[in-house]
Image (cartoon, rainbow, N blue to C red):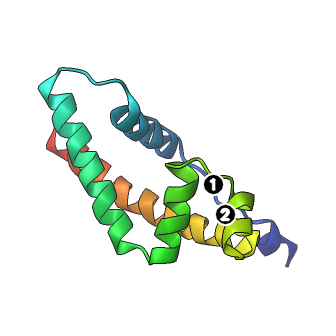
Amino acid sequence: MNFWRKRREISLDTEDTLCEDIANTLFCPSQDAPDTVYLRRLVWHELDAALAELPPEQSEVFCMTVFDGMPVKDISKATGIPVATLLSRKHYAVKFLRKRFHELYDALISQN
């Protein structure tokens, strides 16, 4: 029983690289290279599409914490939703987005 309770999600090195690559593409200062501009547009488009596929409550908490920089405690105070519920919603959103962007990343890598 303790084995299952202590079991944690193992992060892979490729996940860390993937997250860094996507963050660099999305948030780096504008570069004039056409391929960088195209890739940035593609990633933002895919992010918008992926967020639209999420249930609204997951998408909202993800956007508020990641893009607006709001602490979960502040969101909880404003909405009356428990912190644990908000963290759970964000977790499911992140899990979905990781899977979705792994698929995009794999598709881009296989084209090279």
The residue at 68%/67% (across/down) is 78
x, y percent for residue 66: 53, 50
Front residue of 9 and 91: 91
As drawn, is 13 to the left or to the right of 86? left
Q: Which residue is mark 2?
A: 75
As drawn, is 72 to the left or to the right of 93? right
Q: Amino acid at mark 1?
A: Ile
x, y percent for residue 52: 34, 70
Residue 106 can be seen in this image: no
The residue at 21%/30% (across/down) is 36
Q: Secondary structure at mark 1?
A: loop
Q: Which residue is mark 1?
A: 10
Q: Amino acid at mark 2?
A: Ile
The dot on residue 67 is none
x, y percent for residue 46: 27, 56
Front residue of 44 and 76: 76
